Image (tube, grey):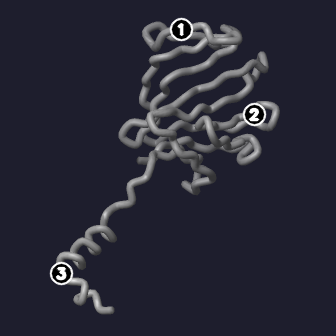
Amino acid sequence: MRLTALGRPMVAALFLWLAAPAWADPMLQVVDPAGKVLAELPFPPEGEICLSWAHSVTGGAVADCFGTTSGRLVLRRSYLHDYAAGLGEVAGRGRVLPAEGGGYWIVEINEPLPPTGLPLRVGPAFVGHSLTNGRDTIDLSALAANQRVSLRATD
């Protein structure tokens, strides 16, 4: 069948559909220093992705949770197991709330990260760097232990 047999309106509609950009949900990418994407994790609708790890001094749980705005990561909240070894709040940067089961959350941080993303030196297995969107998890320590990566958002 020739395209002209479909009629001009149908051919025009087909062209516009094929030329339209693919609309995708925002993603968090793990990128190596050469720019190679090592892993991707979709942001849930209206949700966040959390980076979790064990604190290097106390071994307690720590997490930073990110959203995305206009293709940029935004730090929304952080979980801290206690106020040990440099952990704590910064005046004027969010509110502290007790966490169920211990520790505390600093919420309403809403701090945009640089457009290039968040540089991160991934720790080994005992540090346990991981990313989760609530459904899927990326074990960063298994993927890139002792390596520098960047976490960045895409639209």
Could you classify mark 2 by the number of other residues whose Cα lies within 10 Å: few (under 14), some (14-19), or many (20 or more)? Answer: many
Residue topped by disc 3: 8
| Mark 1, secondary structure of its residue | strand
Quarter of the figure with the N terminus:
bottom left
Which residue sits at x=50%, y=46%?
27
Disc 3 or disc 1, which is closer to the eye? Answer: 3
Could you classify mark 1 by the number of other residues whose Cα lies within 10 Å: few (under 14), some (14-19), or many (20 or more)? Answer: some
Three-letter amino acid code of the residue under disc 1? Val
Which residue sits at x=23%, y=76%?
10
Of residues 144 and 71, the one drawn nearer to the viewer in this rendering: 71
Q: Is residue 49 left or right of residue 155?
A: right
**Figure check: 128 above or below 142:** above
Percent position of residue 131, x then y: 64, 37
Marks 2 and 3: CB-CB under 8 Å? Answer: no
Three-letter amino acid code of the residue under disc 2? Gly
Label 2 to label 3: alpha-carbon separation: 58 Å
Q: Is residue 92 left or right of residue 147?
A: left
Percent position of residue 74, x then y: 45, 31
Percent position of residue 153, x then y: 47, 43
Residue topped by disc 2: 128
Which residue sits at x=30%, y=68%?
17
Residue topped by disc 1: 96
**Figure check: 45 above or below 12:** above
Which residue sits at x=69%, y=10%?
102
